[in-house]
């Protein structure tokens, strides 16, 4: 990934928070020179650093886990906070007119090793962890214990647990850092005016004083 120094993010807590809030990963496996791409929610069970682990599960019919036996190169890609930035957002536009459109976004690339398991207990732990994580903010969180044990057992028989061990991390937070403070504030104001780009505005605001 092309990362100009201004857009490179190295703060672990910032990267972890983003991945936690955007768990749907684009999974890229390369075997025999051919890419295989899938979209699977992954949750971290440790810090985002080399050796750290994220977990997921897929349907047994999904071909992704079957490719793991070929020892493919593997990458998880997490993206979000995406927004078009209009030149009209910049206060400098009517003064210099030396502005062009751009696109702000966040991209986190994790390279590592993907493995799988058919073990019933590991699959149950994986599903339970993912469920607890996603249900945590609900007033009455759903738990796998809310469903009949026989039903959960049947559901688990149809999935495969995945584990991804991190080797390297790249993070790009493109948030108008190459603009003046006034123009960056203009981007914040412009993006905050649309609920669909509020997250992108928050990322610019987060990096305003960095």
Image (cartoon, helix red, strand yellow):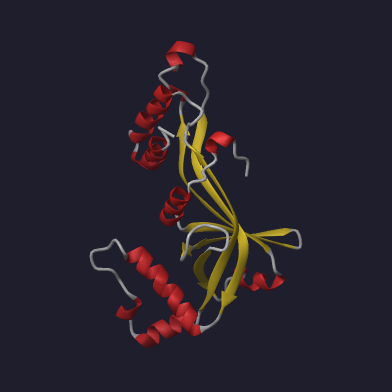
Please report the residue visible at 50 percent of the width from the left and 71 percent of the height from the top.
57
- Relative vertical location of residue 83 with respect to residue 136 in this rendering, above or below: above
Decide which of 33, 49 is in the foreground and name it.
49
Determine if residue 95 is in view.
Answer: yes
Q: In this view, does 170 lie to the left or right of 176?
A: right
Q: Is residue 130 left or right of residue 193?
A: right
Q: Is residue 86 left or right of residue 74?
A: left
**Residue 165: x percent and y percent?**
57, 65
Name the residue furthest top.
Answer: 95
**Residue 7: x percent and y percent?**
53, 37
Name the residue furthest bottom.
Answer: 150
**Residue 127: x percent and y percent?**
43, 73
The quarter holding residue 1 reads top right
- Relative vertical location of residue 193 with respect to residue 51 in this rendering, above or below: above
Please report the residue visible at 44 percent of the width from the left and 48 percent of the height from the top.
14
Please report the residue visible at 33 percent of the width from the left and 85 percent of the height from the top.
148
Determine if residue 89 is in view.
Answer: no
**Residue 150: x percent and y percent?**
38, 88
- Relative vertical location of residue 41 with respect to residue 90 in this rendering, above or below: below
Name the residue furthest left.
Answer: 139
Please report the residue visible at 40 percent of the width from the left and 19 percent of the height from the top.
91
């Amino acid at each position: 990934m092309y990362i100009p120094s201004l857009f490179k993010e190295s703060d672990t807590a910032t990267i972890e928070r983003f991945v936690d809030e955007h768990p749907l990963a684009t999974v890229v496996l390369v075997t025999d020179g051919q890419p295989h791409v899938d979209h699977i929610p992954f949750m971290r069970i440790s810090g985002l650093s080399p050796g750290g682990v994220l977990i997921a599960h897929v349907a047994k019919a999904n071909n992704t886990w079957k490719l793991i036996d070929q020892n493919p190169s593997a990458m998880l890609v997490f993206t979000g906070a995406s927004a078009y930035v209009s030149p009209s957002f910049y206060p400098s536009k009517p003064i210099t007119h030396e502005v062009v459109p751009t696109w702000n976004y966040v991209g986190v690339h994790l390279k590592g090793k993907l493995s799988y398991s058919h073990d019933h207990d590991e699959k149950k732990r994986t599903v339970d962890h993912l469920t607890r994580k996603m249900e945590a903010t609900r007033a009455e969180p759903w738990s796998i214990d809310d469903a009949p044990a026989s039903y959960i057992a049947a559901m688990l028989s149809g999935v495969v647990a995945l584990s991804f061990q991190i080797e390297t991390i790249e993070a790009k937070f493109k948030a108008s850092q190459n603009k003046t403070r006034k123009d960056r504030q203009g981007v914040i104001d412009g993006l905050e005016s649309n609920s669909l780009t509020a997250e992108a505005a928050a990322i610019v605001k987060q990096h305003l004083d960095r």
